[in-house]
Amino acid sequence: MRSDVIVVGLGPAGSTAAYRLASAGLEVVALDKAVFPRYKSCGGCISTKVTDILDFDVSGVIEHEVRGATFTYKSLYPLDIISDRPVGYNVMRDRFDHLLVEKARGAGARIVEGARVCDVEIGSGGATVRTEAGGCYRGRVLVGADGASGLVGRRLFGMKPKEAAVSLTSEVPYDRKALAAETDGRLYIDFGSVPFGYGWIFPKERYLSVGMAGDTEWVGGRIKDCFDAFVSSHPLLRGFEVKERVGWTVPIYYDGAPPAVRDRALLVGDTGHLVDPFLGEGIYYAVKTAGAAADVIVEALGAEKAGGPDLRAYQEWIERVIKPEFDAADRLSDLIYRHPRLWFKILEKEPHIMLRYYDVIRGEWDCPSFYEWVYSKVRGKPFRALRRWIESRFMPA
């Protein structure tokens, strides 16, 4: 069958794209190898700015409001930095993603579940997608949203799945009422437990989502050892048995990544490595890039010329809006993850720095401005190693 747009992958990016495109009146076919709801390995914390850019209510799948975090260094020296306003919300991805899929279906998108894509082609007449079950779908435009190692990103765009962080997660059952005092309104974040990354504990309704992620080159094959040390030493996890572990990759933004537009195809979210390189936040950027891509597609198909729809405005938007944020986040990750103990000592002395970063997470402040502010705060402090690093790496031009 032929449609206006084929969307491959129905995580937050694909579902949002399908929803927005169908809502605009386009004929949309959206495919995913899974049948929803399905489990998805993920920390599952969405920033408050996610709800700001969705035009429907997600409160029904929010399991925990986050106003701040208890930070530790190698599971020691707990430091509470709690705001008086929400910073984010914890969700289980099976429920959250299913909600987005149903919104896309309700908007008129044709949802094809259990369809594993095995081949994609782009030609002068449009896109062709084939599935292992023998399905064949044709459309004027293709949206690649099939994840970090998805076929669309690798085959059509040359994305490198190894340019990623490696992660382990586990869902640990717990009694929320029994741990209410320790978990109400907060996350747990640990620096130093994994090279070039962090560990976390995100409370949900029935589970503690426990995990860690670190840069692949720095971690090597040690992620399991790091994870075991973290769960056996963190005070909140005493008495819990952490059994099931699921590994996954976080496709962080990297310099030199191919453009997210090629002819009649474009990439959104994780598939385009459009993930914050500091926090590893992907859901917000999945929703945001999908919305921007949908706007460009709607306009491009409405003004299509003989040479096909012009999708280049999407890449221009990425360069203008997303890349400055990611470049700044990359500098911050380099600073903090190379020097986790030094960063933790700074937070101990000046916790308001993290409170200001919460404004970045909320979308009330941009990353480049935050970096300039941090520089102005620390350049007069007696952290000599930090000052030398800042002066060489991110002193304002």
Image (cartoon, rainbow, N blue to C red):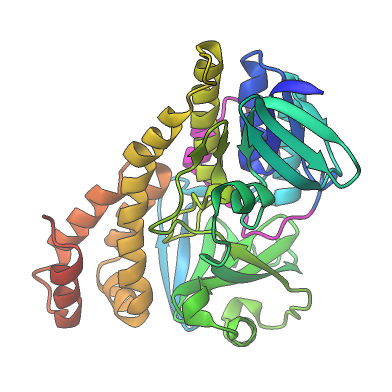
Queried whether the magenta region covers residue 131, the answer comes back as no
Q: Nearer the viewer, residue 365 or 142?
A: 142
Vertical side of 329 occupied by 247: above or below? below
In the rendered view, tell whether residue 34 sits above or below residue 308.
below
Left or right placement of residue 197 versus residue 351 in this view: right
Q: Quadrant of residue 95?
A: top right
Instruction: Tell me where residue 384 appears, x and y as whole percent.
Output: 14, 81
Residue at 30% across, 50% down:
367
Looking at the image, which residue is at 61% across and 15% down?
Answer: 24
**Where is residue 319 drawn, in percent x and y?**
35, 41
Question: Of residues 226 and 207, which is closer to you in this image?
Answer: 226
The foreground one among 53 and 104 is 104
Q: Is residue 350 visible?
A: yes
Would residue 283 be visible to someone looking at this image?
Answer: no
Image coordinates for residue 86, horizontal then vertical, percent: 47, 46
**Magenta span has 46?**
yes
Q: Is residue 344 left or right of residue 276?
A: left
Q: Quadrant of the C terminus?
A: bottom left
Give the residues in magenta.
39-60
Task: Judge left or right: residue 397 versus residue 71.
Answer: left
Tally of numbered discs: 0
Please say if 81 is above or below 105. below
